[in-house]
Amino acid sequence: MTTEVPLPQLGEGDLAFGARSGADAPLPRDPSDLAQILHVPVTLSAVLGHVRVPVGDLLTIGPGAILELDRKVGEAIDILVNDRLVARGEVVLVEDRLGVTMTEIVRPGA
């Protein structure tokens, strides 16, 4: 079952998000200029944390194993688009499923 998630409308400031400076990357002059890319699929990931384990330990992991991540409970998670950090958020419960709410947009170079 696929659930449609409504997306917020982009404002003028959002159009500049991720744009490179210089003449080789002009900003769209009109939001309708974005129409040609609005249906391009991207990979969106919500990363709870990371852990490094030796291959030997990886082979012994089974059901019920606990992996200690590099984040604390309640700490913001990273939201990536095509493996690029774009926001931070919090895990939320939506009915009987997990979701993520964005709490901060990460600007390039910040």
Image (spheres, grey):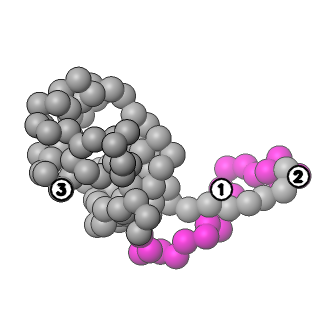
Which of the numbered marks, if any, corresponds to residue 35? none
Amino acid type, label 3: Gly
Q: Are marks 1 and 3 in contact (CB under 8 Å)?
A: no
Q: What span is colored magenta in the figure? A: 56-76
The crowding category of the residue bearing disc 1, from other C-alpha atoms within 10 Å (few below 14, some 14 to 19, many at least 20), is few
Amino acid type, label 1: Gly
Q: CA distance from mark 1 to mark 3?
A: 46 Å
Mark 2 / mark 3, whichever is N-terminal: 3
Q: Quadrant of residue 5?
A: top left
Residue that lies at the very extreme toward the front in this rendered image: 23
Q: Which residue is mark 1?
A: 64
Q: Which residue is rendered at x = 24% and y = 43% of the image?
A: 27
The N terminus lies in which quarter of the figure? top left
- 19 lies above or below 77: above
- Residue 43: x %, y % from top left: 43, 37
Q: Are marks 1 and 2 in contact (CB under 8 Å)?
A: no
Q: Which residue is mark 2?
A: 56
